[in-house]
């Protein structure tokens, strides 16, 4: 029995499984569209290009940092792009082992009221 105490690790694992499903569905669709390979199984080309980019809204800057750090602890690659801090908005990124990109972000919605 695996007991995971960190809810971010559970969330990250769920997101990675969803990303893998998207990647596999894309590989199968590409395979099914090709009449030259009717009996081959679809293959995935890992880490060439991300299959998907997931933008994730967080409630605070600390939650953004915590998600990226949790992803790095379980095999992800943290900060594949430079963190962006615009004062009213903060985002970082990470990639899962299949190369899918996740961008947790926080935005100060009260700053939008004055715009």
Image (cartoon, rainbow, N blue to C red):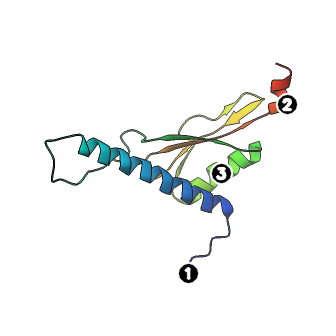
Residue at 73% x, 49% y: name it: 63
Point out residue 42 in the picture as x, y percentages from the top left corner: 26, 51
Point out residue 40 in the picture as x, y percentages from the top left corner: 18, 53
Point out residue 106 in the picture as x, y percentages from the top left corner: 72, 38
95 vs 86: above or below? below
- Work out whether residue 40 or residue 66 is closer to the camera in this orientation and state it: 40
Q: Farthest residue to the bottom: give it.
A: 1
Q: Would you say the residues marked 3 and 1 are in contact, meaning their CB atoms lie under 8 Å apart?
A: no
Residue 45 in view in this figure: no
32 vs 89: above or below? below
Could you tell me how far apart the alpha carbons at marks 1 and 2 are, in whole angstroms? 44 Å
Determine the image quadrant of residue 34. top left
Residue at 83% x, 27% y: name it: 111
74 vs 36: above or below? below
**Position of 31 compared to 63: left or right?**
left
Local SS, label 3 = helix
Question: Pointer 1: what residue?
Answer: 1
Could you tell me how far apart the alpha carbons at marks 2 and 3 are, in whole angstroms? 23 Å
Judge depth for marks 2 and 3 and give the one in front.
2
> Which comes sooner in the sequence, label 1 or label 2?
1
Question: Pointer 3: what residue?
Answer: 67
Q: Which mark is residue 110?
A: 2
């Amino acid at each position: 029995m695996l007991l995971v105490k960190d809810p971010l690790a559970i969330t990250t694992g769920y997101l990675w499984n969803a990303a893998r499903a998207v990647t596999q569905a894309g590989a199968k669709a590409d395979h099914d569209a090709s009449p030259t390979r009717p009996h081959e199984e679809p293959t995935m080309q890992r880490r060439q290009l991300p299959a998907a980019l997931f933008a994730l809204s967080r409630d605070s800057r600390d939650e953004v940092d915590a998600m990226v750090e949790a992803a790095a602890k379980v095999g992800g690659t943290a900060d594949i792009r430079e963190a962006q801090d615009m004062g009213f908005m903060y985002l970082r990124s990470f990639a899962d082992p299949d190369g899918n990109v996740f961008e947790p972000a926080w935005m100060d919605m009260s700053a939008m009221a004055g715009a």
